[in-house]
Every structure is written in C-alpha cells, then in structure tokens.
Amino acid sequence: MTSPEISVDPRTLAAAGWHESDLAWERLQQEAAELASAGDSDGAAQRWGKALRLARADFADNDPRLAASLTNQALSVRCKGNEALAEELLIEALLTWDAAASWIEAMNPERRSRSSTFHLRLESKHKGGYVHFSQERYQAIAAEGRAATLAHKLGKPAGGTGDRLPRWRKERPAGFTDGRKLLAAVLLIA
C-alpha cells in the first residue's frame, strides 16, 4: 500500500530550493497515511517516527512540517497508551504551528502562468496585493493544520481527517514549492 518511489533529478530539487530530505519527509508521511488508512498502525507509526527524526534534524524549528510530524507522532504514542508523551508532543506541535507564521511570511508566492495577467493587473492597481492575498491563503491553510492539532490535543476528531489523504492526492502541486511543503504539512496530519 506504500506509494511508488518517484525518482527526481537532484538538480531539479536544488533548482527549486528543495533537498532530498524535503521529498523523503513527504514520502514518509504519505506512506504513513496510506498505512494508517489500511489499518496498519505499526507500519504507520514506524514511518511517523522516521519522519519526525528527519524533521528535527533537517527542518527549522518553525517549519509546519515539524508541527505535522509532532502531531502524528503524538497520535502514534497515544494509541500505544503513552498519554503523557502524547500531550508533550501536541503542546510542542501547537507551539511550532504558532512559530510557523514567520516561516509562512518568508514564503514566496507561487506564480502561475495561467493567471499571470490577473497578477500583473493586481500588482499595478494594488502594490503588494498579490503577495498579501497569497499570504492570507497560506495563513488559512496553516490555520487548518493548527486546528487539527488542537482538536487532537482536546481529544476531539480533527475536522476533515477522513478526507485529508484523498485531498493530498488531488491537490498536491506538481512543482517543488514552499506551498507544497505547507499543504503537505496540513493534509498529511493523521
């Protein structure tokens, strides 16, 4: 049930500002989500653990993917009966989601050729408008991830949990962008 290994030229990743660890984290989280959906909690837990170790080693403290990894690991240890550790991880995840605001502010808005005329007109009429609207969209996406983490902390079902993996498969951007990193952090929360 794991996703097929996709080969990506390292030069393509480097040109986009990505590293192999960015792609590896995404693969681990998607595989874990697929395994969890299939009822293989041990396989999912193993991958969530690897993804958290990778996120702690390679990502900034304010990276939303670290928050997602902490959330998923918390759910994994909660299922094994370690509520105290789960609570610690969820608190750390919420703090990381809060810190992610600065990570999101540093994101470059994605330019899409199909709407470049719209973007040019927006910029000419409202200086900085395109960046502002993009930032608002990114903050709304991050708020969904934080809300899912908070719901787990409160012991409530995270809204949209059942549709996150199908949404990821459908909405995952083809390019290697910061927007893809953020979307993965939100949609690959268990």
Image (tube, rainbow, N blue to C red):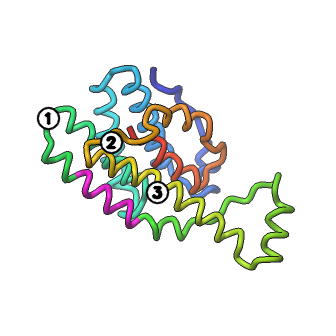
Depicted 36 relative to depicted 74: above or below:
above
Which mark's residue is nearer the viewer, 2 or 3?
3
Residue 32 sits above or below residue 70 on the image: above
Percent x, y for residue 22?
48, 49
Give the residue furthest to the bottom: 127
Quarter of the image containing the C terminus? Answer: top left
The quarter of the image holding the N terminus is top left
Q: Is residue 78 left or right of residue 124?
A: left
Q: Position of residue 187 (x, y in %)?
A: 48, 42
- For label 2, the SS is helix
The residue that label 1 is drawn on is 81
The Cα–Cα distance between marks 2 and 3, rounded to whole angstroms, is 17 Å
Q: What range is drawn magenta here?
A: 89-99
Q: CA distance from mark 2 to mark 1?
A: 15 Å
Q: Position of residue 10 (x, y in %)?
A: 58, 47
Residue to which mark 2 is pinned: 72
Q: How far apart, in angstroms, are the residues tagged by discs 3 and 1?
A: 28 Å
